[in-house]
Amino acid sequence: MEKKNKYSIIIPTYNERLNIAIVIYLIFKYLREFDFEIIIVDDGSPDGTQDIIQQLRQVYGEERILLRARPKKLGLGTAYCHGLRYASGDFVVIMDADLSHHPKYLPSFIRKQIETGASIVTGTRYVKNGGVHGWNLLRKLTSRGANVLAQTLLWPGVSDLTGSFRLYKKSVLEDIISSVVSKGYVFQMEMIVRATRKGYHIEEVPITFVDRVFGSSKLGGSEIVEYLKGLIYLLLTT
Ligand SMILES: Nc1nc2c(ncn2[C@@H]2O[C@H](COP(=O)(O)OP(=O)(O)O[C@H]3O[C@H](CO)[C@@H](O)[C@H](O)[C@@H]3O)[C@@H](O)[C@H]2O)c(=O)[nH]1
C-alpha cells in the first residue's frame, strides 16, 4: 500500500487565546481525510494562550497537537524555524492563528501540490479570485505597496510575496531556511525569493485574507523598517 503523506502545520501564536480553538476545530474539520499534526509555537503569550492549547491537546490528542513554547516574543521568522525542528511530516504548512488564513483552503493547497508535484504552494491574495477583506485603506496600501516594490526590484515570478500561508515539501523548507537571515515578518518574503532563485517549482492558490475579528495585529512600524532592510539585502544578495 502506498504511504500516506503526513502534513505538519506550524502555527505561531502570540496572544491568540480567543482564536486558537476555532482555528484548530476548523483544521480538524477540513483535513479529516489527511494525516496531520499541528505544531504551535507560542512565545510566552501573557493572555493564557498556552492554557487553552493544553486543554485542546486533551480534547484532540496530545500527539496531534504539539506545543513548543518559547519564553518570550522572539519574532515570527524564528518561530517558524523553531516549529520546523519538531515537524515529522513530509510536508509543512505555515499559517496564522487568527483565521485570516482560513483552514478551508488547506485541501486545495494539498490537491494542487499532488496534481503538480510542486515543491511549494503559496496562497496568494493578488490574483483573480483572491483578495483581502477587512483591512483599512492604510493597511491595504502598505501591503500592496510592499508587494509592488518587491516585484519591481526582485522579479520573483510569484504574485504575493508578503503573504505567509504556504505549503512546503519539508526537505525544500529545510534547504531554503538554512540560508535565510530575516527574523521578523519579512522572513516570508526572503523565503519565497530564495526559493525562486534556487529554481524550486512554486504553484499559487488564490485565497481571501480576512482580517482578524479577535485580538490585534502584531505588525508594527519596526517590522516595516525590517521589511525595507530585507528588501535591500535581497536586492544585493540574490
Ligand atoms: N510565536 C510568535 N508568533 C507571532 C509573533 N508575532 C506574530 N505572531 C503570530 O503570527 C501570526 C500573524 O501575526 P499577525 O500580527 O496577526 O499578522 P498580520 O498583521 O495579520 O499579518 C499577516 O499578514 C501579513 C501580510 O500582509 C503577513 O506578512 C504576516 O505574516 C501575517 O500573515 C499570528 O498567529 C500571531 O499570533 C511572534 O513574535 N512570535
Image (cartoon, rainbow, N blue to C red):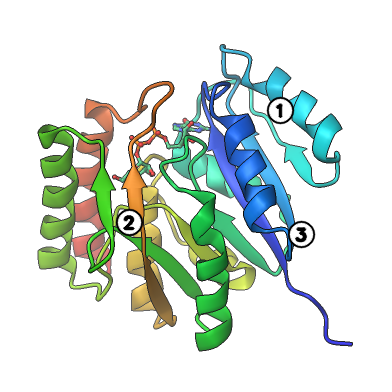
Question: From the Cβ of disc 3, is ligand 1 less than 8 Å away?
Answer: no
Report x, y in % for residue 13: 54, 31
Find disc 2 in the rendering and name its residue. Answer: 189
**Splitting the image into 4 quarters, where does residue 200 fall?**
bottom left
- Separation of marks 2 and 1 at Cα, in angstroms: 29 Å
Quick one: label 2 or label 1, which is nearer the N terminus?
1
Judging depth in this view, the residue of 37 and 19 nearest the camera is 19
Find disc 3 in the rendering and name its residue. Answer: 88
Looking at the picture, does residue 150 appear above or below residue 46? Answer: below
> In the rendered image, which quarter contains the C terminus?
bottom left
Report x, y in % for residue 35: 77, 63
Looking at the picture, does residue 207 appear above or below residue 12? Answer: below
Camera sees residue 177? no
105 displayed left or right of 29: left
* Callout 2 secondary element: helix
193 displayed left or right of 81: left
Judging depth in this view, the residue of 158 and 224 nearest the camera is 158
84 displayed left or right of 199: right
- Separation of marks 3 and 2 at Cα, in angstroms: 25 Å
> In the rendered image, which quarter contains the N terminus?
bottom right
Judging depth in this view, the residue of 75 and 53 nearest the camera is 53
**Residue flagged by tag 1: what amino acid is it?**
Ile
**Splitting the image into 4 quarters, where does residue 217 fall?**
top left
Report x, y in % for residue 26: 61, 45
Q: Residue at the location (68% across, 44% down)? A: 39
48 displayed left or right of 80: right
* Residue at the far front in the pictured view: 29
